Amino acid sequence: MATRRPRIYGLLAEFKQPEQLVAAAREARTAGYRRMDGYTPFAVEGLAEALGRRSTHVPLITLIGGIAGGTGGFLLQYWAATIAYPINVGGRPFNSWPMFIPITFEMTILGAALSAVLGMLALNGLPMPYHPLFNEPRFALASRDRFFLCIEARDPRFDRAQTRQYLESLGPQAVMEVENL
Amino acid sequence: MEPEAPTPTNASAVRRSPFIQPGYTFGSVTDKIGSIVLTRRFGKGWWAGFLLAFSLVLLLMYSMTYLFVKGVGIWGINIPVGWGFAIVNFVWWIGIGHAGTLISAILLLLNQTWRTSINRFAEAMTLFAVACAGLYPVMHLGRPWFAYWLFPYPNVMGVWPQFRSPLMWDVFAVSTYFTVSLLFWFIGLLPDLATLRDRATKRAHKIVYGILAMGWRGSATHWYRYQTAYLLLAGLATPLVISVHTVVSFDFAVGIIPGWHTTIFPPYFVAGAIYSGFAMVLTLAIPLRAAYGLKDFITMRHLDNMAKVMLATGLIVGYGYVIEFFTGWYSDNKYEFFVAMNRLFGPYAPFYWALICCNLIAPQLLWFPKIRRNVVVLFVMSLVVNVGMWLERFVIVVTSLHRDFLPSSWGMYEGTRWDWFIFVGTMGLFVALLFLFIRFLPMISIFEMRELVSETSGHEGGD
């Protein structure tokens, strides 16, 4: 018999306070759950750490973008001013690099800023207009005043009944099954 | 320290009062700000204001069309004053934009939580001001349909831009500034757009905010990367905003015109920019908080802080005026000294003294806490500073040019009606965009207000 895709995306526990969610996330991780995520109306301090997220590549991407922007900006000016279209201004050197600094600087910032934003969106997998979590009507409160913990069905330790029981033991407002259509 | 009574009356109470009035929860903050966009009706006041502003936009379009047909000759510019209103207004608008970035980026890095309730519309102000500013150099090109020649792209003419020119630096500085401000603003909006999407009841709202929110779902992992990116953007925008007005001042300082060729220009321009920008934030914040009942979020303490920033930057600008004059004298260059004296006593002296009154003398009233807490006086003061800063740029541009090295090439400059139409028109564009903004996007960052609630009032998350 072929293994069927899990019918549900995961189990969603709703909390009223951010601290409760952080505590629950930490506990669930200790209990061995890995495929889970918290959903909050604002960035809750310590939640990402509690879920085991240690680092992100956003700063590295930004750095690379900045270096690429700056180098590209300078080389473009150098190439245009010395090779492609040299203009002799009173015998001054073609590679008048001090005059190229402002644009090099602006291009560094532009490259870094664009890569920070696009890198963040790409790593987050956005834009993603549909997500199974949106099937749960109460999930709309995640952008208002509720704090959610979702243990996903693809977690190796996931078991529909047991995990539900476990989540309920963490003291949430409610535990819901999220359908995966 | 415990947050205190709701309506502070004396100085120390304002200083200690919280940045959000107590009693708000995550939910009520969300509803209060979100409902302005989602459920509030378009009032008569909104329509009146918007239509007035929009009629000025029509004036702008009419004037620009006439300008493009006839050429820049319809303006008052000529030799010796080849830079008139276009450059004055360009610098003025760009300067106004700077406060938005300062509030959103620099105050974020300095951990100033009071920025939270004013950063969103200050950033919007930045975008709209930079958009207005950007129009002027393009209009000044003479053949604006070739504006894209300013950008380096491979072309059949085999020509490349002159990267050694400050005007070229301007192109890069201003376009980078606009792009980064837009990114910063949009990224800041993303979680709030998701809130609007989730709270929307009308189909049109659901679709538009749903698309704009990009499927943001508030995942902790996403928030983690989001915050990193946001902080990095703030760190990048900080040197950027300083560089932009520095580059703008290079337009003048790199030239050898007496009165422009000074090293004080970059810092003096940056301070002036922040000064005028905060004045504009006050000009906008004071009516907005009254009209939309946001006095609990934009408190007296915010206005007080902004007035203090204005006072401080105003003093730096004042220092700039003194040094400008000092340099003119100390340089022992007769042209430099002539320009300095000509500003004080020449044909444009009334403008100079008016700017001194507006920028240097009047703001000294802000030393008094009573004045800083008087909303009406503060509003008038912010207008006075805006006028003063416009006069400053006018004096810098015109007085330095109108007396050329040779007396035979001396001249006078005044704006024609087209100069004024276009200036007033960009004001209309700015205001019209702001009117649209406050009705279609949350003018206060909702998720940051929730954060503020969670930090200040203990945790009363639920309803």
Image: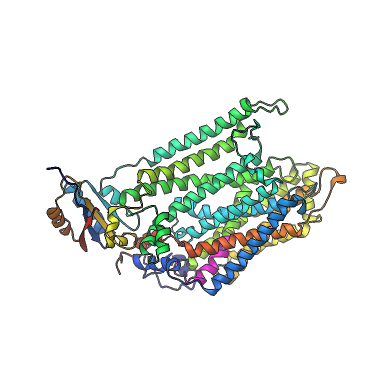
Number of labels in the image equals 0
Residue B282 lies within the magenta run: yes
Q: Main secondary structure of the magenta part?
A: helix
Q: Work out which residue is located at the far right of the displayed protein and give it.
A: B408
Left or right of A129, for residue B385: right
Q: Is residue B94 above or below residue A140?
A: above
User: How was the colour assigned to the protein in this rendering?
Assistant: rainbow
Magenta region: which residues? B280-298
Comparing A148 with B1, the one in front is A148
Left or right of B108, for residue B139: right
Residue A131 point in image, percent of width and height? 30, 52
Q: On the rendered image, what quadrant is the N terminus of chain A found in? A: top left
Residue A139 appears in view = yes
Residue B49 point in image, percent of width and height? 58, 69
Residue B272 appears in view = no
Residue B437 point in image, percent of width and height? 51, 61
Left or right of B413, for residue B6: left
Residue shown at 47%/43% (left/top)?
A113
Residue A107 lies within the magenta run: no
Left or right of A68, for residue B454: left
Comparing B463 with B2, the one in front is B463
Comparing B415 with B408, the one in front is B415
Q: Work out which residue is located at the far front of the displayed protein and give it.
A: A1
Residue B8 point in image, percent of width and height? 46, 72
